[in-house]
Amino acid sequence: MTGADPKIPRSGEEIKLHDLVCCHDPAAIKEEVGRIGNMFGVDFDQWRFEQAMADLVRLFGGEYPGFLASNTSYHNLEHTNGVVLAMARLLHGLYLDDGVRFSGSQLLVGLLAAMFHDAGLLQKDAEQEGSGARHMVGHERRSIALAAEYMQEHGFSGEEVANCGTIIMATALNQPLVEIPFCDQTTALLGKVMGAADLLAQMADRAYLEKLPLLYREFVEAGVKGYDSELDLFSKTMDFYCSLAQPRLQGELGNVQRVLRSHFKVRWGIERDLYAEEINSNLVYLQKLLGKCGSSYACLLQHLNRGGGR
């Protein structure tokens, strides 16, 4: 959907995050992010951005030489689309609220980092065993390598390639940002935005709770410890948010999400933080389900068949 779509409710209280742009649709993401890119008052390279988005679809679809199609159900193209969109919205909010003047190159490199941040989960032709989830632990390095290869082939400078890599590294939850060798303060800010976009996009996903079993399966294949079952992952999700995600967003990532209200006001005429609202809705509903279902995973699944709303 776009801003002119008459299907969008006109009441500000009725509009939800998923009413604005569909993350299932790469064309809608490309259109919206391109529109946002033109709102910075700089020479944003629309052609290069659109080419990269088209190549991203080819890459995840198995149409890119040397790579298999994406076969991870949680960290897939839809998730990447959501992160690219959240990245653009956060950057626009920083421009509006803090007066940050990103150059066209900086905007494009930041968006490329969002596009490639999970590309390391894609398998190469020779990697036939299992799924890309096998590479989850440390996948950021693979993502950085693939982004560098792509950018070098498409004429980006060595500095732009290096900056994209440091920005992607900011998505690693176990990587302190102070240890990432950002070349300057603006690139460090882009890293903070990248880390925030990755967390916000997935936790504000309308179907976030329904997708947690898919994430658990990826964890099992990757050998990630700490979760004994799908139900255990559900039970620990609130703690993940309160103990890790929220402190990281408000602390190390600089509380950049505070600018989203300004973006939505200017772009859509909605003076609300729709990401915060959706995350709260997901977590409130999760608490309700855990209280209702206790240790019954079947009960929990029964109430996770997402219908028209919660």
Image (cartoon, grey):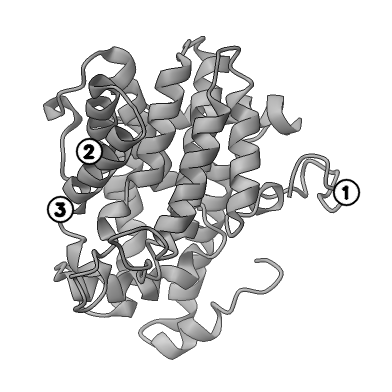
Residue of label 2: 169
Q: What residue type is labelled 2?
A: Met
Local SS, label 3: loop
The circle on residue 289 is none
Residue of label 1: 6
Distance between mark 2 and mark 3 Cα atoms: 10 Å
User: Can see residue 172?
Assistant: no
Local SS, label 2: helix
Please tell me in which quadrant of the rendered image residue 130 appears: bottom left
Q: Picture coordinates of residue 112 (x, y %)?
A: 39, 36
The circle on residue 138 is 3
Local SS, label 1: loop
Q: What residue type is labelled 3?
A: Gly
Q: Picture coordinates of residue 268 (x, y %)?
A: 73, 33
Mark 2 or mark 3: whose residue is earlier in sequence:
3
Q: Which residue is drawn at 16% across and 67% down?
A: 224
Q: Which residue is drawn at 44% across and 50% down?
A: 56
Q: In which quarter of the image is the C terminus?
A: bottom right
Please tell me in which quadrant of the rendered image residue 273 appears: top right
Q: In this view, does 25 lie to the left or right of 188?
A: right
Distance between mark 2 and mark 1 Cα atoms: 40 Å
Q: Picture coordinates of residue 45 (x, y %)?
A: 53, 24
Q: Is residue 10 left or right of residue 109?
A: right
Which is more toward the observer, 72 or 19?
Answer: 72
Q: Which amino acid does label 1 sit on?
A: Pro
Distance between mark 1 and mark 3 Cα atoms: 44 Å
Is 67 above or below relative to 71?
Answer: above
Which is more toward the observer, 191 or 298?
Answer: 191
